[in-house]
């Protein structure tokens, strides 16, 4: 049970990041490999806001400032996602598929080096806004930070699902993902919907970045491995499928935790679990758990 709680916590973070990958792929059919670096930039924005406002505060006021910093991280991440789409991807929308992919890799490297130049390569700590002393329920040890991660992840995923399923903009996003030309003929502003998709996906990644930073640290390369694992989660769930990204993220978190704790895989090799799962899924069910195989016409 302890491993399950730990796995769900880790999986919630993967799922939040994976949503950005799957939303962009669902509409543009390409992988935004700069997603992890957008996460990193959003986390830095939240960290600096938190450190600026928290001086002399404690208790509920400090917790309030923490959530303000999360909102700032979301706005910063969402804005950066829109800017990257506008500058690096939109001009290549009609280009061969390899072009925006290479552009995404270029953006990733630029953002990583820019962060190192501006913020320095020294790791920074996102201090807890509360006591993180664990408490025991039924023999299971749970920290307040784990509850925060689980709570924020679930709320964000439910809100996104409601937005996609119940709102006019959500229906426009679904229509755009099915056929951009038909959606445009039906009066949908495709460019606006694509920008909105990048904004939402990037904002969710920034939230995940803040949650990661509470347990670990903030540094220029923090988004690389987290982004790659979230990409694996999106593929496992069925890339392009919102529910699949959530399931894939949670499943990957659980498998990684059980792999280390139960199968005895060394912590130093735990990153190989995600990519082993990726290879197995591609061999057994290439479309992912909830994905549907589409046969291309020649």
Image (tube, grey):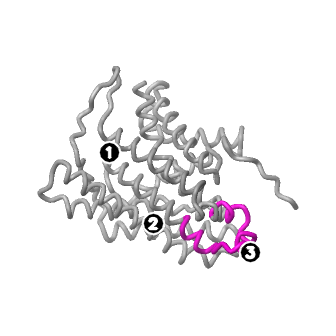
Q: Is residue 183 magenta?
A: yes
- In the shown orientation, is residue 236 left or right of residue 139? right
| Crowding at mark 1 (Cα within 10 Å: few <14, some 14-19, many 20+) | some
> Which residue is disc 3 drawn over?
185
Q: Which quadrant of the figure contains the C terminus?
A: bottom right
**Disc 1 from disc 2: Cα separation:** 23 Å
- Per the image, label 2 sits on a secondary structure element best described as helix
Whole-percent x, y for residue 10 in the image: 44, 40
Q: Nearer the viewer, residue 166 or 108?
A: 166
Question: Which is nearer the N-term, disc 3 or disc 2?
Answer: 2
Q: Which quadrant of the figure contains the N terminus?
A: top left
State the predominant SS element of the stretch in magenta.
helix
> What stretch of residues is rendered in magenta?
173-197
> Is residue 293 placed above or below 115 in the rendered structure?
above
- Per the image, label 3 sits on a secondary structure element best described as helix
Which residue ends up furthest to the top in the rendered image?
139
| Crowding at mark 2 (Cα within 10 Å: few <14, some 14-19, many 20+) | many
- Per the image, label 1 sits on a secondary structure element best described as helix
Where on the picture, by quarter, is residue 123?
A: bottom left
> Which residue is disc 1 drawn over?
215
For image coordinates 54% across by 52% down, the residue present is 162
> Which residue is disc 2 drawn over?
78
Question: Which is nearer the N-term, disc 1 or disc 2?
Answer: 2
| Crowding at mark 3 (Cα within 10 Å: few <14, some 14-19, many 20+) | few
Q: Mark 1 or mark 2, which is nearer to you?
A: 2
Question: Which is nearer the N-term, disc 3 or disc 1?
Answer: 3
Q: Mark 3 or mark 2, which is nearer to you?
A: 3
Q: Nearer the viewer, residue 174 or 86?
A: 174
Whole-percent x, y for residue 170 in the image: 59, 60
Where on the picture, by quarter, is residue 94?
A: bottom right
For image coordinates 63% across by 74% down, the residue present is 189
Q: Mark 3 or mark 1, which is nearer to you?
A: 3
């Amino acid at each position: 049970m302890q491993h399950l709680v730990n796995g769900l916590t880790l999986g919630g973070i993967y799922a939040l990041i994976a949503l950005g990958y799957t939303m962009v792929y669902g509409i543009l059919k390409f992988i935004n490999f700069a997603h992890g670096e957008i996460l990193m930039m959003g986390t830095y924005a939240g960290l600096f806001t938190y450190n600026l406002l928290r001086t002399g505060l404690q208790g509920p006021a400090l917790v309030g400032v923490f959530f303000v910093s999360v909102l700032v991280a979301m706005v910063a991440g969402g804005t950066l996602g829109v800017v990257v789409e506008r500058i690096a991807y939109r001009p290549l929308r009609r280009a061969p598929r390899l072009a925006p992919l290479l552009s995404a890799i270029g953006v990733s490297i630029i953002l990583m080096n820019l962060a190192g130049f501006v913020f320095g390569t020294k790791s920074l700590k996102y201090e807890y806004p509360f006591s993180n002393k664990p408490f025991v329920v039924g023999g299971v040890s749970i920290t307040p930070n784990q509850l925060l991660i689980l709570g924020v992840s679930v709320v964000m995923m439910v809100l996104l699902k409601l937005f996609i399923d119940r709102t006019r903009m959500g229906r426009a996003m679904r229509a755009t993902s099915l056929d951009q030309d038909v959606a445009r003929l039906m009066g949908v502003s495709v460019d606006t919907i694509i920008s909105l998709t990048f904004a939402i996906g990037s904002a969710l990644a920034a939230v995940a970045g803040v949650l990661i930073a509470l347990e670990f640290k903030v540094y220029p390369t923090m988004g690389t491995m987290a982004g790659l694992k979230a990409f694996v989660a999106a593929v496992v769930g069925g890339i392009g499928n919102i529910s699949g990204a959530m399931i894939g993220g949670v499943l990957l978190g659980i498998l990684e935790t059980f792999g280390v704790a139960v199968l005895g895989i060394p912590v130093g090799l735990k990153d190989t679990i995600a990519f082993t799962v990726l290879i197995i899924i591609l061999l057994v069910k290439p479309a992912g758990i909830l994905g549907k195989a589409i046969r291309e016409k020649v």
